[in-house]
Amino acid sequence: MATPTLDAFQVIADPSRRQILYLLTKDSYNISNLAENFEMSRPAVSKHIGILETAGFITIKSIGRERFCTLNQDGFTELRNWIDHFDEFWNIKLKNLDTILKGKKNSN
Amino acid sequence: MATPTLDAFQVIADPSRRQILYLLTKDSYNISNLAENFEMSRPAVSKHIGILETAGFITIKSIGRERFCTLNQDGFTELRNWIDHFDEFWNIKLKNLDTILKGKKNSN
DNA sequence: CATATAGATAACTTTGAAGTTACGAATATA
DNA sequence: TATATTCGTAACTTCAAAGTTATCTATATG
């Protein structure tokens, strides 16, 4: 891995990274503990962690030689806003449909 | 492009596909009209459309030799659910914090 | 009928994300 | 101090997504 800087959408496109985020909703993990939950090597996990931290999805607290990971809400904001935009689209569509139906009723 | 079958997260990881989805919140487009909005070739857009349709993000209605694209809510559902799961995580965390603070007040 | 337009698909190339192993640095422990 | 543990990074390989051009089909139009 070349530890690239990915946008929020690219970050969650990887199933392993989504799995890491899921694990972190259950508990805090250090890198080695995380790696135990995957087939891939520890360096691979380490790089995923780097990507997740850079994109603001997790926060890392170093204690001695260990690095403990916890979720960070920041990274999710862009995704939530994006989804919200489309939810708004559907809601407006529904509202327009409702208006049309009510108009029909009135003209009958 | 090898027109692969991608999961919902991989589908929206591509900026061009997100742009296509955005354009479709404004209007319905056929393939050529869409391609006019991008630097890439029409075949490239055509393949993105195939990916978006397969993943349930858009619906295509053929009229004559044209294929008109509109948004389809289905593809967004998985993403919405995923985001909601993490929102729930933050809410629980907030609630727990609230409980702790209230407990403190009571014991003071 | 001849030509133009809309689009799909095949074949190919390029690029970068994702993984690996090897190794070094820093911290903990016997 | 010697050893074990945790972790990051460099160097490398692999693979598939994303793009291209060329070509074909189908529909519309003069």
Image: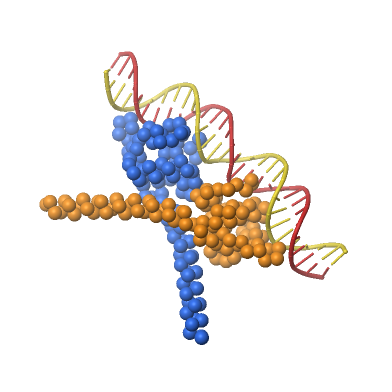
Chain colours: A blue, B orange, C yellow, D red
Q: Residue reaching furthest bottom?
A: A108
Residue ID at (49%, 46%): A13
User: In the figure, is residue C17 to the left or right of B29?
Assistant: left
User: In the figure, is residue A44 to the left or right of B61?
Assistant: left
As displayed, is residue B94 above or below residue A88? Answer: above
User: In the figure, is residue A48 to the left or right of B45?
Assistant: left
Examine the image and state in which quarter residue A31 appears. Answer: top left
Residue ID at (51%, 56%): B75
- x%, y% of residue A47? 45, 36
Residue A75 seen from this side: yes
Which is more toward the observer, A106 or A12? A106
Q: Residue reaching furthest left?
A: B108
Residue ID at (25%, 51%): B96
- x%, y% of residue A38? 43, 35
Residue ID at (48%, 65%): A90
- x%, y% of residue A41? 45, 31
User: In the figure, is residue A28 to the left or right of B57?
Assistant: left
Q: How many marks?
A: 0
As displayed, is residue A5 above or below residue B106? Answer: above
Residue B41 seen from this side: no
Which is more toward the observer, A5 or A22? A22
As displayed, is residue C18 above or below residue B74? Answer: above
- x%, y% of residue B14? 55, 50
